[in-house]
Amino acid sequence: MKKILTFTLIFFSTISSINAEEIKRIFVGNKDAKITIIAFESLTCSHCANFHKDVFPELKKEYLDTGIAKIEFRHFPLDIAGFNASKVSQCNNDGDSKILNSLFANQQKWVKGSSVQEANENLQKFLVSEGYNVDFEKCINDKEIEDFVLNDRIDGVKKFKVNATPTIIINNEKFEKTLNYKNLKKALEKLI
């Protein structure tokens, strides 16, 4: 038991010390905006998909596209399918949210399968059907991207006590109200 605990501590301290600055964070909005929103999400989380469907379009229109705020997407995978999808969304390393948004918008098309292999096959088929040109095996086996995704999850727990998805952070403060556009708008208006 002691050896397992020691290995676990060494493993997580190694991950958290890796410098992943060369991997671009996925974000939308003005990078120098006064308001920074951080969204900790899992690509297999239905509540996160609902956030992207019901809240994000208005948020984008009113605050992100106008330069008032930016949103940074942080990975908080809840399962291996979410973990692999997170790695794929980061794989092009261009900071673009297109794949991430598509995975949320079409979650029902790819989040299925009774094994990791089946889940990966469904994810891969979805990406091909949507015309995304990614080297799937390279993406899910890329150690730097894997560490980047795991570091997001570790940082979320350590810095913000994230324990569910989606968790929204606004200017380093955890958003504690029910996550809907009306409540989010009230919080953002106080910061303008």
Image (spheres, helix red, strand yellow):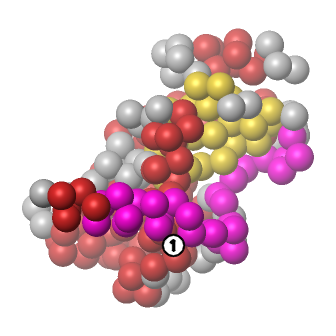
In the drawing, does residue 33 fall left or right of residue 83? right
Q: Residue at x 87, y 34 (%)?
A: 34
Residue 86 visible within the image: yes
| Residue 9: in magenta span | yes
Tell me the quarter of the picture where residue 7 sits.
Answer: bottom left
Read off the residue under disc 1.
145
In terms of depth relative to the viewer, which is nearer, 29 or 21? 21
Query: At which x and y percent is residue 25?
Result: 66, 60
Q: Is residue 57 visible?
A: no
Q: What residue do we see at 43% from left, 87% from top?
A: 138
Left or right of residue 170, residue 130 in this image: left
Magenta span of residues? 7-33
Residue 129 or residue 104, whichever sits in front: 104
Please tell me whether residue 122 is drawn above or below residue 171 in the rendered image: below
Q: Residue at x 51, y 60 (%)?
A: 16
Front in this rendered view, residue 153 or 34: 153
Q: Residue at x 27, y 54 (%)?
A: 79
Q: Position of residue 129 (x, y in %)?
A: 40, 74
Going by the numbered disc 1, the residue's amino acid type is Ile
How far across and how far down the image is residue 150, in percent?
Answer: 45, 60
Residue placed farthest to the front in the image?
A: 2
> Which quadrant would the C terminus be assigned to in this image?
top right
* Relative height, residue 11 to residue 156 (above, below): below
Residue 127 found in image quarter: bottom left
Q: Quadrant of residue 1?
A: bottom left
Across and down, in percent, residue 39 comes to: 57, 40
